[in-house]
Amino acid sequence: MELKSFDKFHQLRRLNHDPSSIGFDPKVKTGDINRFAGRVRLAKNFRGINLEGYSQETISGYNAFFLVFLTHSALERFNEINSFGLDLDKLNPLIAAYNPEKVIQEFVEKDKKGLFYNFLYKRVNDKLKLKLSDCRSYNSTNVAHISASIRHIFAHGHLCAHSNGINPKDVYSICISISDFLLKFMDAEFAKKIEDYYNKVCTNTI
């Protein structure tokens, strides 16, 4: 599975419509779009890791973290091609349009004791602490701040399948919810940009 409008993007490129004219960041090249698409495809097609000597429960926990890691790396590329840089707050109005409340609820309800949240909160930087807290208290629906927290703490080797007594099955549910949401969000936003441009200038030429 890959981006729904990826083929159409390359149709536009073959007709010499460059990424900036389509609406991407002026510095973005075709290779940047390809790298973004590749990361999305990798996350969409991730089916888990193969480990010997681990319980299925533990493997499910690691699968969850790897999936969010891959998804957030795609989100970083998404931000890059759309001129958002490292500022996840710029995603707020976009994400809000895709009903992220269910993901936030899953993050809270599957971690009622706050074991997962507290483990992340103690280890992220001060800015992410505030954003993560806002998600936990339902004051923010920016799912990207949760994925950023998981990605950073897992990538740096702190987060394990049973850290702080967390239940890997609950964490798996949380991470699947986050990843599914963000992948659908990125796919839809990419398609919207491509389709809007395509319908505006190319319907009669392709």
Image (spheres, grey):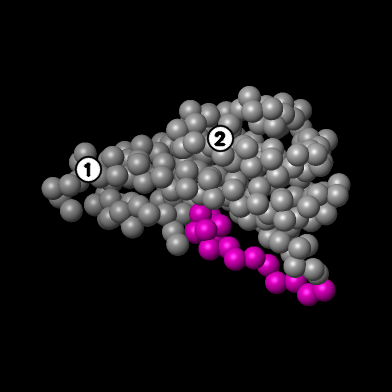
Please tell me whether residue 157 is drawn above or below residue 50 in the rendered image: above
Q: Amino acid at mark 2?
A: Glu
CA neighbours of label 1 inside 10 A, class few (<14), some (14 to 19), many (20+) = few
The structure residue drawn at horizontal position 75% and vertical position 55%, both measured from the top left corner, is 168
Confirm whether the magenta stretch covers residue 61.
no
Specify start and end residues of the magenta stretch as a single range.
38-53
Q: Position of residue 11 (x, y in %)?
A: 28, 55
Residue in front for this viewpoint, 184 or 152:
184
Please tell me whether residue 17 is drawn above or below residue 140 in the rendered image: below
Residue in front for this viewpoint, 59 or 72:
59
Residue that numbered label 1 is attached to: 199
- Give the quadrant of residue 102: top right
| Label 1: which secondary element | helix
Q: What is the tally of numbered marks visible in this picture?
A: 2
In this view of the protein, can residue 57 be seen by the observer? yes
**Image check: 131 left or right of 25?**
right
Do callouts 1 and 2 mark residues in contact (Cβ within 8 Å)? no
Q: Amino acid at mark 1?
A: Asn
**Image check: 84 left or right of 198?**
right
The structure residue drawn at horizontal position 49% and vertical position 36%, both measured from the top left corner, is 99
